[in-house]
Amino acid sequence: MPGEKSALAEITEAFRRNRAALAQEIERVPEILLHTPPASGGWSVAQALAHVAAADMPFLKRIDQMLARPGGEVPMLAGIQDAPAHPSVGRTTRAQFLEQLRAQEPAVLQRLGRLTP
């Protein structure tokens, strides 16, 4: 219907909005806490951010598969297993995480822009 957003436009907007919100949250984390896992266990903020950044790669693969087979079937979870389950991050700084996320964003948006509803 005229005036309604396509699902693809909504996905693209959500990606942009979520990346901006993530960048704001990263800015709020004190550098000293970035690599400190919670006392209750689990991932540190740095590990969670590394996982988000690493997940872009299988996401990009999935979009590439869709672009290579317009109208064709693409296996539902193709490439998702490539994201590390527990990433190793070394001493990556907040600025480096932000730079990496911002550097990957254009590739995702470019590919999303090539998809058709």
Image (tube, rainbow, N blue to C red):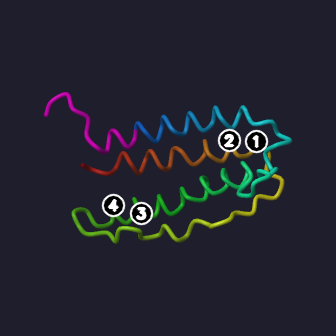
Q: Position of residue 68 (x, y in %)?
A: 33, 66
Instruction: Tell me the tag on residue 62.
Output: 3
Outermost residue, left side: 1
Mark 4: few/some/many CA within 10 Å (<14, 14-19, 20+): some
Outermost residue, top side: 3
Amino acid type at image mark 2:
Leu
Instruction: Tell me the tag on residue 94.
Output: 1
Q: Earlier in the sequence, mark 3 or mark 1?
A: 3
Return the residue nearer the eye: 36 or 73. 36
Q: Secondary structure at mark 4?
A: helix
- In the image, is 73 to the left or to the right of 10? left
Q: Position of residue 98 (x, y in %)?
A: 68, 41
Instruction: Give the CA distance from mark 4 to mark 1.
Output: 33 Å
Bounds of the magenta segment: 1-12
Instruction: Give the CA distance from mark 4 to mark 2.
Output: 28 Å
Residue 7 higher or lower than 63, as above or below: above
Amino acid type at image mark 4:
Leu
